[in-house]
């Protein structure tokens, strides 16, 4: 689908996207690039990372990839520093790296719980923490009045409760809290806007294939009148909005982009 935004809306910006090699992260990287930004993507596996970078470059996007695991502080540094060296600036950080699997609470080991907390919540904080010096406008180590923005990818699982997602619900709740705390502190100190986004079920993503096998999707469509699967494009457009100047007065919010799915209740009245 064609973008409703001007093609230069992110011109001259550099975005660093964790989990940028697949799913939502890759589409955000693509759309940032198509709107004028240069992008660095971070991922754990070199080979697939390189394939994603080549795909972005084939679209004419100035893209690089750096190997790293958001669970490791040294990896965060090892990705952020060369991104800055390569482009001379970092303007936008998107935390899209996530881990997930379906498991009931009884069978989930504490280490399984911790693994997802480490990737999603601690990883998000680590990346924000390590990138701060670069996101402050004026470059590393220099304090200035404007910088950022940061976008943290969350979910709606924890607004109520979700079956077999205790670890991810806890991790995403922590991300939403991190978003608000950083929006308060860094919004005040550095004018860095920190927002989140909570996608609903999005077609052709690792999340959907892991959490909703095809038979479940068909059932959901039949039983939930509001069930509507979104596209990666929907998420990327919302991301472009939030990190562009169009979103300059939005801070500390987590934008739900799910077509209203999370609101659904069966109607009990005739
Ligand atoms: C129960 C499991 C498990 C499973 C792993 N574990 N998979 N427990 N059921 N299916 C447990 C392990 O037994 C181990 O605990 C601990 O978790 C760590 O497992 P590892 O395999 O060593 O971890 P690792 O290799 O680091 O892999 C992390 C991962 C993996 C999260 C398990 O799936 C991954 O790398 N995922 C990244 C990609 C991904 O998931 N993307 C989807 C994001 S979707 P023990 O106790 O045995 O040591 C998404 C959507 C959000 O975020 C919401 C949408 C609505």
Image (cartoon, rainbow, N blue to C red):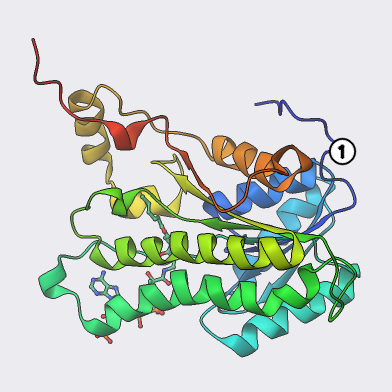
Residue that protrudes farthest toward the bottom in the picture? 74
* 179 to 202, vertically: above or below: below
Q: Quadrant of residue 111?
A: bottom left
User: Percent x, y for residue 143?
Assistant: 84, 74
Does 222 sit left or right of 198 as displayed?
A: left
Which residue corresponds to the image point at 62% horizontal and 47% vertical from the top-left? 27
Which residue corresponds to the image point at 33% horizontal and 63% vertical from the top-left? 168
Does the residue tagged 1 have its C-beta within 8 Å of any atom of ligand 1? no
Q: Nearer the viewer, residue 129 or 257?
A: 129
Residue at mark 1: 8
Q: Quadrant of residue 106?
A: bottom left
User: Percent x, y for residue 246?
Assistant: 74, 37
User: Percent x, y for residue 128?
Assistant: 63, 72
> Tag 1, which secondary structure?
loop
* 178 to 266, vertically: above or below: below
* 232 to 105, vertically: above or below: above
User: Percent x, y for residue 110?
Assistant: 23, 83
Please tell me in which quarter of the rendered image ligand 1 is found. Answer: bottom left
Q: Nearer the viewer, residue 31 or 84?
A: 84
Which residue corresponds to the image point at 28% horizontal and 78% vertical from the top-left? 112
């Amino acid at each position: 689908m064609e973008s409703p935004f001007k093609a230069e809306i992110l011109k001259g910006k550099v975005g660093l996207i964790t989990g940028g090699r697949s799913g939502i992260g890759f589409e955000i990287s693509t759309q940032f690039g198509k709107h004028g930004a240069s992008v660095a993507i971070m991922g754990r596996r070199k080979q697939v990372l390189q394939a994603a970078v080549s795909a972005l470059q084939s679209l004419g996007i100035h893209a690089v990839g750096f190997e790293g695991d958001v669970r490791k502080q040294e990896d965060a540094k090892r990705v952020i520093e060369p991104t800055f060296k390569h482009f001379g600036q970092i303007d936008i950080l998107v935390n899209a790296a996530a881990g997930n699997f379906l498991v009931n609470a009884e069978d989930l080991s504490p280490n399984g719980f911790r693994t997802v907390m480490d990737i999603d919540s601690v990883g998000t904080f680590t990346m924000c923490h390590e990138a701060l010096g670069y996101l402050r406008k004026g470059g590393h180590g220099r304090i200035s009045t404007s910088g950022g923005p940061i976008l943290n990818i969350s979910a709606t699982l924890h607004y109520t409760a979700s079956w077999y997602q205790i670890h991810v619900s806890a991790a995403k709740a922590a991300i939403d809290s991190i978003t608000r705390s950083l929006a308060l502190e860094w919004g005040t100190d550095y004018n860095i806007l920190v927002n989140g986004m909570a996608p609903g079920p999005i077609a052709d993503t690792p999340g959907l294939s892991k959490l909703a096998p095809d038979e479940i999707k068909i059932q959901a469509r039949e039983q939930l009148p509001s069930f509507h699967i979104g596209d990666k494009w929907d998420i990327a457009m919302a991301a472009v909005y939030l990190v562009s100047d169009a979103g300059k007065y939005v801070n500390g919010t987590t934008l739900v982009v799910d077509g209203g799915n999370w609101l659904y209740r069966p109607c009990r009245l005739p």
